[in-house]
Image (spheres, rainbow, N blue to C red):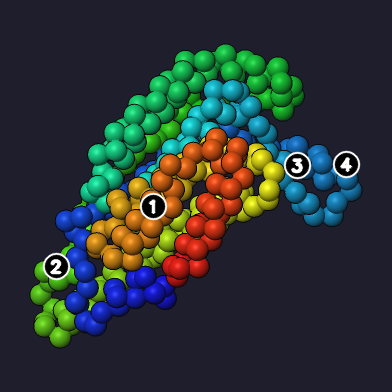
Amino acid sequence: MNQNVANFTAPAVSVPTISSSAMLVELNISLWTGRKFDKVVSQEIDTAKHTTTRAGNYHKNLIADEPIFQAIGKFAGNSRSFHYHATMPWSDSGMRLLTTKMYFDYHKAISQMEMDFDQLVTVALNDYPNMILRAQHKLGTMFNVHDYPDVDDLRNKYRFSVKFSPVPDVGDWRVDIGNDAQQVLMESYASAYTANLELAYQDVWTRTHEALTNMSSKLSGNSKQIFRDSLVSNVKDMVDLLDKFNVTDDPKMKQAKAKIESALVGITPDALREDDDLRLDTKNKVDDLLKEFSW
């Protein structure tokens, strides 16, 4: 167990409550794959290769190579990346922890993403009949018009939804099963609650450690270094998240934020590229931070 969250291991139902400082959020994005298994072609390949059993499956790329569908797929991936960055893990069901400090920025960004996603899908659907005609030319004898859903069915294959829900309090069990059984349920949930909170915090520590480790690695050497501005901005972003993700007012997280912030005062990517002494001094400070905290 990480030393920074060890204080969350408490007996019975005595665990920190975060119901007023965080909520649960689930992002679901569904896409059409644009691929179709072709049984006839798969059998033809088996015959041509003289296999004695089904050696593989051939899937046709119906229209997935169309730029607009590639753009939708890339946009969905970027949206998921934002969602994971702005939240912390909570449960295996897909729910993630969103702090109240992050809520307004998250809600504004994800709402805009939902609108942009819908606009991209609309553009794709408007050109869908033409895409089918182009696919007929590309696929030749493998083309089968029945492989393609109609426009309404295709629209239903695209979903972008966000669901918010409260974090249940440990003691909020309103079932009539007797005091002893209810106590067992509360203790079981308290254990899961604590484990989820530890997992959430460990994710923050891990992300911060990765950003600092990457900075230390890039600052090695005496010559002018080639690196992106994100080398600095990624660490500064984690400093901000150490504050916004600190739902239990953890002192170690506060201390880490303050020390990283202090180490980066006045530090810019250009200054690090041009000044060998500053680069070495910054690397030493970062290395000290990596040694100080139990990441």
- Give the labeled residue for mark 3: 42
First in residue order: circle 4 vs circle 3: 3
Q: Secondary structure at mark 3?
A: helix
Disc 4 vs disc 2: which is toward the camera? 2
- Say which mark, if any, is on residue 120: none
* C-alpha distance separating marks 4 and 3: 10 Å
The residue shown at (39%, 52%) is 262
**Other-residue count near label 2 (Cα within 10 Å), few / some / many at <14 / 14–19 / ≥20:** few
Q: Is residue 204 visible?
A: yes
- Give the labeled residue for mark 4: 48
* C-alpha distance separating marks 1 and 4: 68 Å
Q: Is residue 196 visible?
A: no
- Give the labeled residue for mark 2: 172
The residue shown at (29%, 51%) is 244
Q: Secondary structure at mark 4?
A: helix
**Other-residue count near label 4 (Cα within 10 Å), few / some / many at <14 / 14–19 / ≥20:** few
Q: Position of residue 182 (x, y in %)?
A: 16, 79
* C-alpha distance separating marks 4 and 2: 65 Å
**Other-residue count near label 3 (Cα within 10 Å), few / some / many at <14 / 14–19 / ≥20:** some
Q: Quadrant of the N terminus?
A: bottom left
Q: Are marks 1 and 4 in contact (CB under 8 Å)?
A: no
Q: Secondary structure at mark 1?
A: helix
